[in-house]
Image (tube, rainbow, N blue to C red):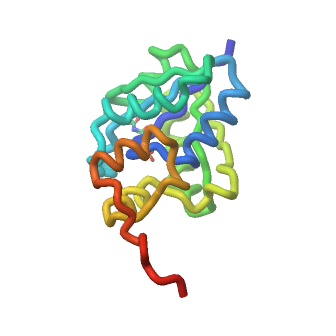
Amino acid sequence: MVRAVYPGSFDPLHNGHVDVIRRASRLFDHLTVAVVHNPLKDTGLFTVGERVAIVRETVAGMPEVDVTAFQGLLVAFMRRANATVIVKGLRAISDFEYELQMAHLNRQMNREVETLFVMTATRWSYVSSTRVREIAGLGADVSKLVPPATLRRLRRRFGGRDALEGAATP
Ligand code: PNS
């Protein structure tokens, strides 16, 4: 039985993440989406609890996927979860350096762990949580970029109006 973990800050979950979850879930017996506060990205849009709730709602129809939060080192969490594969999404070469460094460090700390990169589908390759937060915060519609569970909470947070509604089309 191969158990994999897809870790991330998911603030908020967007369609690129959902694509990676869906595709990775087909590769392993079990996939845990592990939400963690990343102090290097002190984003703070949603609490970790809210992010877990969003992911849970989104993966409700995927029986081989579960969702949890963790604190501390990922490799320690991997041991507790009895998992051997870390799944990460790659959108572009620009993600690679950051991800490669983490993959090497994680492997140096725990030799049992392998990192597997899933290339995000090209249709979502330009979507990032940072841009979703920015655009939604400025009042524009992000309904094409995020799953319904994220959209509902973004609308609750920022209001439902589309800042571009009624804008003249060039
Ligand atoms: O979605 P993110 O924020 O890019 O994911 C990064 C994350 C959360 C996977 C990474 O910061 C992490 O693993 N954090 C847990 C603490 C840890 O193990 N740090 C050492 C990484 S080499």
Tell me which residue sits at (53%, 14%) in the image.
82
54 in relation to 139, above or below: above
Q: Nearer the viewer, residue 134 or 114?
A: 134
Q: Residue furthest right?
A: 27
At which x and y percent is residue 28? 69, 23
User: Is residue 52 left or right of 113 when viewed as pictured?
Assistant: left
* Outermost residue toward the front in this view: 166
- Image position of 129 (left or right of 44): right
In the image, residue 32 lies at what x, y percent?
53, 24
Q: In this orientation, does residue 170 appear?
A: yes
Q: Position of residue 49 (x, y in %)?
A: 31, 30
Q: List the single residue furthest toward the bottom.
A: 170
- Ligand 1's quadrant is top left
Given residues 139 and 39, the one toward you in this image is 139
Q: x%, y% of residue 130?
A: 40, 58
> Which image quarter is the C terminus in?
bottom right
Q: Nearer the viewer, residue 10 or 112?
A: 10
Quadrant of the image for the N terminus?
A: top right
**How many numbered callouts?**
0
